[in-house]
Image (cartoon, rainbow, N blue to C red):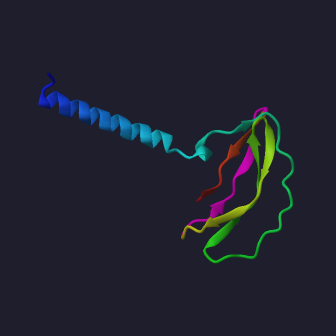
Amino acid sequence: MISNRMSRLLGSTLTAALCCAATLTAAPASAQVVIAPTAPPPPRVEVVPAPRDGYVWDQGRWRWEHGRYVWAPGHWQPVRVGYRWVPGHWAQRGPHWRWIDGHWA
């Protein structure tokens, strides 16, 4: 028979483990490092919509998906007051290309 103290300790340990697992699995997919073996194609020409109050336009980009580049169209980002939007971009690192996520700075 497990004592009350041991039962509480196991319960606390299990709770902490579940919280850690939930935190790790909640990381956004965009937080993953994306590396491509070749340079992306030139950006497509997009018609930028008229400005919208409270939003900034995030231009379209090439995504590396299943061994090839796939176009992802632009979209609106809600404005964060006091910050400016830095668009995502591809950067060459040695012979490979790495995706740098867009972010607020």
Q: Does the magenta segment cover residue 90?
A: yes
Image height of 23 relative to 83, above or below: above
Quarter of the image with the N terminus in it: top left
Image height of 70 relative to 10, above or below: below
Magenta residues span: 82-95
**Residue 84 in the figure: left or right of residue 95:** left
Q: Using the image as rendered, state which of residue 47 and residue 39 is in the foreground.
A: 47
Rendered image quadrant of residue 76: bottom right
Q: Residue at x 74, y 60 (%)?
A: 74
Image height of 71 relative to 13, above or below: below
**Residue 3 in the figure: left or right of residue 69:** left
Residue 11: x and y in percent read: 25, 34
Q: Residue at x 47, y 39 (%)?
A: 24
Q: Residue at x 12, y 26 (%)?
A: 3
Residue 88: x and y in percent read: 69, 53
The residue most toward the front is 1
Q: Using the image as rendered, state which of residue 89 and residue 67 is in the foreground.
A: 67
Quarter of the image with the C terminus in it: bottom right
Residue 18: x and y in percent read: 37, 37
Residue 20: x and y in percent read: 40, 38
Rendered image quadrant of residue 69: top right
Q: Does the magenta segment cover residue 26?
A: no
Q: Using the image as rendered, state which of residue 77 and residue 18 is in the foreground.
A: 18
**Residue 31 in the figure: left or right of residue 3:** right
Q: Residue at x 70, y 66 (%)?
A: 57
> How many numbered marks does the figure carry?
0
